Amino acid sequence: MSLGFRLWQNLLPTMNRSLAPSKAQCLRRCGAANIARTRLHTIAAAAAPVAGERRAKANIDWDSLGFGLKDVAATMYVAEWTPEKGWDSGKLVPYGPLNMMPSAQVLNYGQAIFEGMKAQESAKGRVVLFRPDQNAARFKAGAARMSMPSVPEDQFVEAVRATVENNLDYVPPMGKGSLYLRPLLMGTGPILGLGPAPAYTFAIFAAAVGAYFKGGQLTPIDLIVEERFHRAAPGGMGGTKAAGNYSPVLVTQLEAKKNGFADVVYLDAKTDTYLEEVSSCNIFVVKGKTIKTPPLSGTILPGVTRRSIIELARSRGYDVQEAAVSVHEAMEDRPARWLWRCTRPSPTSRPRRPTTSSPGSTPSSKCMHACLLAA
């Protein structure tokens, strides 16, 4: 078992936050009992207990879950914002279409951000969330960057809690998958000229899902280094989870998959030298007790799991460095191991160089090897 996997396996139980016992559901704060709270930087936010009973969902095959909308949850959350009233209290409605005009700002100018979160069953039979307060804070920062009215953090967390509570029967049994949650903030008001939308919608939908990659949670994947295109540039939107950041990577991602790779590793836009992230992943390089990850300089997403790994690894005595890692350093450093964070924590595997490349060659002909673990 690799070093990174052991590290994450040891740290993960300390970072879950309880959402619901199997009989009486509640959302309560849960942190690492043996780690100083000043080092974890978590918030004290205990939501009111909620009642509910989990029900069996007979028409879901828990053993064949994929990452998609085949088993989308029946209930979603929707809240609306207007200049006159601000955010309303929101409501739970059946999963279905959202009403908007063809002139909606989001359809014409792309004013939208989103989050990705999961609820899953713990070994104690509770349904747990992974630091939803951190997603709420990032959602707020993203709204500010996109000139949208921010959703109050307490409303965000409560909306997530309510969505999970009302879809408990879509939470897979422990080890079978998770209930994926997708919070969205969109400029749904109509507009013709470029400008902020006159109205906004905050929505959360959910689906029972399995592993993100087809091979499974621990199956190694091959990643190819991209040199033609960049995911983000200095001064741009790389540090914001904006909807428009993701479709542009499809041109390289689809080409990579056609050639047998699972995804693409992007380099910095200024020098084409330093690793930044995968299409939707943060990167960690593990060598002994030293862990390196690219610094947050505005071009990569400040991942919630990234922050958690840094905090907890440091508390365990690891030397965590937020520093630039060149692709040549990574590929030549054979003893190093890799930890990729792809909307979920991941174990590690050693970088791999194809037989066609030689020392000092350009990274376009190189690939890397990694494993993923859903958490």
Image (tube, grey):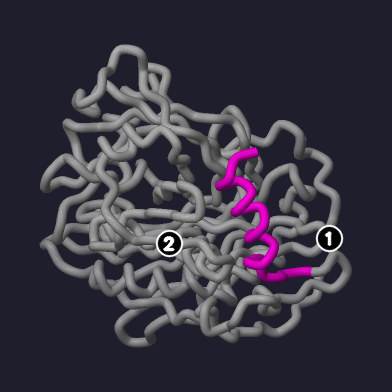
Where is mark 2, residue-wise?
Answer: 320
Relative vertical location of residue 119 with respect to residue 62 in this rendering, above or below: below
Residues tagged 1 and 2 counted as in contact (Cβ below 8 A):
no
Vertical relation: 151 (above or below) 185: below
Q: Amino acid at mark 1?
A: Gly
Closer to us: 56 or 89: 56
Provide residue 238's location: percent of width, then percent of height: 26, 55
Q: Which residue is mark 1?
A: 125
Up/down of 49 relative to 171, above or below = below
The part of the image, by quadrant, that contains residue 241 is: bottom left
- Mark nearest the camera among 1 and 2 is 2
Describe the element under mark 1 as helix, strand or loop.
loop
Q: Is residue 236 left or right of residue 180?
A: left
Which amino acid, by three-letter code, is at mark 2?
Val
The numbered mark at residue 249 is none
Residue with the most extreme top position: 356
Q: Is residue 100 left or right of residue 67?
A: left
Report how far apart the C-alphas of labels 1 and 2 lie in the structure: 33 Å
Q: Is residue 7 left or right of residue 225?
A: right
Q: Residue at x 35, y 69 (%)?
A: 200
Residue 78 in magenta?
no
